[in-house]
Image: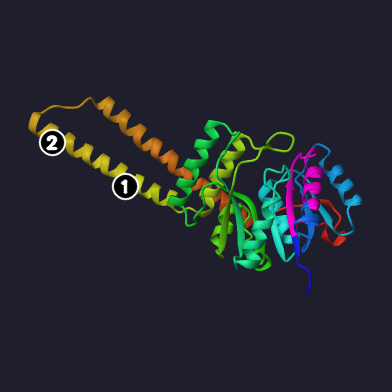
């Protein structure tokens, strides 16, 4: 019986202190509890400015031939592009996406493989039961975000779900068919369907270094998820416009009744100011909303590559735009 290969995609941005620790942890796991499987790593260096790439090259040189590959972007293009690049280069029977900082415990791969191989699932994801070590604002934002996404979009996200997920080859191939430029991987995984099991785990502190996610980056990621799969904002704009017209109509009726029954004229200046603020603000908001969608249409129409490889150890044929 042929041995199956588990391939791990590891997006890495300024993770010089972590990439070696990650390799050691995975190597020990497969040498002990997952002896029945071979493993390969694909490090995707997302334009790091520290020594991440050099450290990855040292790991490649020390590891058995063909066990560790790397892709280095021409600049920082974001985690979504890194995940797509790794998936596109993967060839393993089972493919996992994991963070380099060991906040995604490699030991969970044991239960994930059991779920897919023995229980018949197509994928298995990790779901955080708590957010210990994170700020209160970030925790509240996370809870609210999942509720909003699940109400406003066509996908269903599991609260606490992470990017840590093991998938069959079939599911990976289907995910790669979705080539939109503005990517929201969690939503894509949900949209393609397939039978998925979620494994709860407690939040784990980073092995070293600091989180690369800023408040601005998290807000951009949240907005991307909503706009990628939600039609509700467009419908909300229509409803809001209708309410504005309704309010204006009611206001007009009140003014007419006031003039006819009581012969009282309202303060014209006040009325004009309120109406200008109401419709002016509504117009600006709606134009901004439409602009967001038009910007995404423009990005798709340009067909720019999702990523550009500056360097890799896959060979010359892979040194190209993705």
Quadrant into which the N terminus falls: bottom right
- Residue 175 visible somewhere in the drawing: no
Quadrant into which the C terminus falls: bottom right
Residue 50 picture quarter: top right
Horizontally, is 139 left or right of 24 in the view? left
Q: Looking at the image, do the residues carrying marks 2 and 1 touch, with CB atoms under 8 Å apart?
A: no
Magenta residues, as a range? Answer: 7-28
Residue 89 picture quarter: bottom right
Residue 138 rendering spot, x and y as whole percentages = 55, 35
Numbered disc in front, either 2 or 1: 1
Checking the image for residue 257, the label placed there is 2
Q: Secondary structure at mark 2?
A: helix
Which residue appears at 61% of the width and 58% of the height? 124
Number of other residues with Cα within 10 Å of mark 2, as a class: few under 14, some 14 to 19, many 20 or more: few
- Residue at the left extreme, as displayed: 261
Horizontally, is 126 left or right of 271 in the view? right
Looking at the image, tell me whether mark 2 or mark 1 is earlier in sequence order.
1
Residue 204 rendering spot, x and y as whole percentages = 65, 40
- Image: 94 above or below 51: below
Number of other residues with Cα within 10 Å of mark 1, as a class: few under 14, some 14 to 19, many 20 or more: few
Q: Secondary structure at mark 1?
A: helix
- Residue 118 visible somewhere in the drawing: yes
Residue linked to disc 1: 242
Front residue of 253 and 101: 101
Checking the image for residue 46, the label placed there is none
Q: Is residue 11 magenta?
A: yes
Q: Is residue 12 magenta?
A: yes
């Amino acid at each position: 019986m042929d041995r199956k290969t588990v391939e791990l995609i590891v997006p890495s941005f300024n993770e010089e202190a972590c990439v070696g620790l990650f390799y050691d942890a995975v190597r020990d796991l497969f040498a002990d509890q997952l002896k029945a499987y071979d493993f390969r790593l694909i490090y995707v260096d997302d334009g790091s400015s520290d020594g991440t790439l050099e450290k990855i090259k040292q790991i490649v040189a020390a590891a058995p031939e063909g066990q560790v590959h790397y892709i280095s972007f021409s600049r920082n293009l974001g985690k979504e592009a890194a995940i797509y690049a790794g998936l596109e280069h993967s060839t393993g029977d089972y493919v996992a996406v994991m963070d380099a900082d060991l906040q995604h415990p490699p030991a969970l791969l044991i239960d994930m493989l059991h779920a897919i191989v023995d229980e018949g699932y197509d994928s298995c994801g990790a779901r955080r039961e708590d957010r210990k070590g994170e700020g209160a604002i970030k925790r509240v934002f996370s809870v609210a975000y999942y509720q909003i996404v699940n109400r406003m979009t066509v996908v269903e996200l599991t609260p606490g779900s992470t990017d840590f997920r093991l998938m069959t080859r079939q599911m990976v191939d289907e995910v790669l068919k979705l080539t939109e430029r503005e990517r929201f991987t969690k939503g894509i995984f949900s949209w393609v369907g397939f039978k998925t099991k979620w494994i709860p785990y407690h939040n784990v502190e980073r092995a070293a270094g600091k989180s690369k996610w800023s408040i601005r980056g998290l807000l951009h990621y949240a907005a991307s998820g909503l706009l990628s799969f939600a039609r509700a904002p467009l419908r909300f704009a229509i409803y809001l416009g209708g309410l504005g017209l309704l309010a204006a109509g009611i206001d007009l009726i009140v003014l007419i009744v006031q003039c006819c029954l009581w012969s009282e004229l309202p303060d014209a200046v006040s009325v004009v100011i309120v109406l200008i603020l109401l419709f002016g603000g509504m117009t600006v908001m709606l134009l901004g909303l439409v602009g967001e969608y038009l910007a995404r249409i423009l990005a798709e129409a340009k067909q720019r590559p999702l990523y550009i490889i500056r360097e890799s150890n896959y060979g010359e044929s892979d040194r190209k735009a993705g």
